[in-house]
Amino acid sequence: MSKGLAVEIKNLVKDFKPSLRAKTIRAVDDVSLSIQAGDVYGLIGPNGSGKSTTMKALLGLLSPTSGTCSIFGQDSMKVDSRNDVGFLPENPYFYKHLTGAETVRFYGKLCGMKGAELEDRVREMIALVELDAASDRRLGGYSKGMLQRIGLAQALVQDPRLVILDEPTAGVDPTGSRQIRDLILTLKERGITVFLCSHLLEQVQEICDQIGIIHHGKMVREGRLEDLISLEDRTELILDKPSPELLEKIRHLVAAQEGTTLISEGHPRTTLESLFLEETK
Amino acid sequence: MNSTTNTSFISPRKILIIAQSTVTQLVRMKVFWFLAPIALLFLGLQFFDVFWYEGPEASQPQQELQMHKNLCLGTMMLFGSLFAIVSTALLIPRDIEDRTLYTILCKPVPRLDYLCGKLLGVIFVIGVAMLVMDLLLVITLHFRTQEVLGEMDGFLESLGWPDDVVAQKKADIAAHGPTLTLQFGVLAHFFKAAIIAAVALLISTFSTSTIFTIATSVLVWIIGALQSIAREAFLNDDTLGESTSWAAKILGTLVSLIFPDFQVFEAVADAAARASEIMAADMIKIAGLAFFYLGIYTVLSWFVFSDKEF
Ligand SMILES: Nc1ncnc2c1ncn2[C@@H]1O[C@H](COP(=O)(O)OP(=O)(O)OP(=O)(O)O)[C@@H](O)[C@H]1O
Ligand SMILES: [Mg+2]
């Protein structure tokens, strides 16, 4: 089901020279990656490893020292490549003097939308990020998580085919972060390509088709998620209300089997995340 | 692949959207409040007799009106220019610091459109402010002129001069009232403020702080005002030998290219205050000059800005 490449980054190198006398910092070192249209790609790596820099280069906010980036086949340095992209920067800030709805409307207009189509879209986006109640308040009074949501609404306003999210769940509470996760899954169902980076590995694991691990500006591991993390030679059984006799039988069966060992046994724990979600429902 | 709309090099619609948002931003920053003290000042002048004004017997009864005009035009020039510098200097560095710019440039918005939009927004707000101040000036000056004419009426009649002399005398005074010439003066100050805004725009594209932008723009403003004086002093400096004088000339030309020359604008504004005639041709000339400077500074800003990284 190859529908072409949404993103293609070839041998991207980005050097920064903070001042004339300082020595250059290589933020991204020969990174290549490509994302199939319709995939969700997760870029993970420690702080300062070059994730945001890669994304900015892809959006043409930074010009690459060498290498090329393109979006749906168009060079990132060209304005036209931005018609089909929505971007949520890390720690987004918008004009504090605009209200939530005005902000989304402003970005919609910048994408060339107008009239009733724009108004419908603004309402739809505000509802999508669940800010209906706050849409007439100025952003100066928004909390961090609310700003993040407005950022998401802004990124999606023109219904782009590619969405780039730089830490979409930073500063968002677990419920909100679960909603953002669900939203990304919805986008995926609709065939929209998502390129994200996040430190919440559990979520990355839940939603991404493809993963890249970047460290010190170098891509150290890349591939499809299931290939990267599955332990092919192990199997896990989780039983609901097993009787002690049944468990005893299983242990005997396993012990009798040559070459198989029982590695662990116990009660599976719920994650803190699910517990939090359960309690704050 | 779906149809990709071609984003042209420069799109008036996007410029207008950015300009509109800039106006909203400035209005919501409550910048128009600075008009309140100016209004008070203009109205206050109304009730303040210039100390050397000696009544209708004075040889120059227009002096009172001229004083009013000088003070008001001076205030408009000062506030217009300072406003242009401060608001432009606040806008772009702030967009960069707040990273609002990321989100704007990630939409299909050419960088030139962003710059033009910001500049247009600031110039529009300056225009509105100038218009308000102009209105105040016209109203206060109108009443003041009526007052002087009224005083003169009684005085001239008591002298028993022939009618045509009296009429001439009154016409002279009326020429110092709110005339079209005065509007030309206001327009000259508006052009000047717009150019200063473009200079501040250029500086803010490469400066990293608001304060640097403001300080440098004020410097350019002062150099622009003093330029011709400085250039003359420089060119006439005899201590420079024959051989260096052409170098001095080149330097002088260079300075006049980099820094806007405000002398022409000042001259028009002065003539307006003195109520001496201003030719339509002169107005066209300064309007052309203003557009030339605006164009130059916008293109220079764009050169710097198009390679900027965030
Ligand atoms: N404008 C800049 N000037 C100088 N150095 C920069 C600049 N932007 C980024 N860097 C450097 O590039 C490196 C990569 O930064 P980047 O922001 O891409 O990291 P990141 O992976 O997004 O980290 P985080 O997880 O903290 O967001 C860092 O060492 C950073 O100091
Ligand atoms: Mg980052």
Image: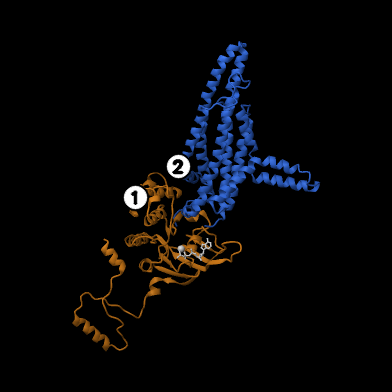
Chain colours: A orange, B blue
- Quadrant where the image shows the N terminus of chain B: bottom left
Q: Is residue A5 visible?
A: no
Q: Which residue does the image show at 20% across and 75% down from the upper left? A: A241
Q: Which residue does the image show at 21% across and 84% down from the upper left? A: A248
As helix, strand or loop, the secondary structure at mark 1 comes to: helix
**Residue B30 tag number:** 2
Q: Is residue A263 left or right of residue A162?
A: left
Residue positioned most to the front: B51
Q: Is mark 1 within 8 Å of ligand 2?
A: no
Is the residue at mark 1 from the same chain as the one at mark 2? no
Q: Which residue is mark 1?
A: A134
- Viewer-side residue, B271 vs B105: B271
Identify the amino acid type marked 2: Lys
Identify the amino acid type marked 1: Ala
**Residue B209 tag number:** none
Q: Label 2: chain? A: B
- Viewer-side residue, B295 vs A147: A147
- Residue B285 occupies quadrant: top right
Q: Label 1: chain? A: A
CA distance for labels 1 and 2: 23 Å
Q: Is residue A13 left or right of residue A228?
A: right
Q: Is residue B15 visible?
A: yes
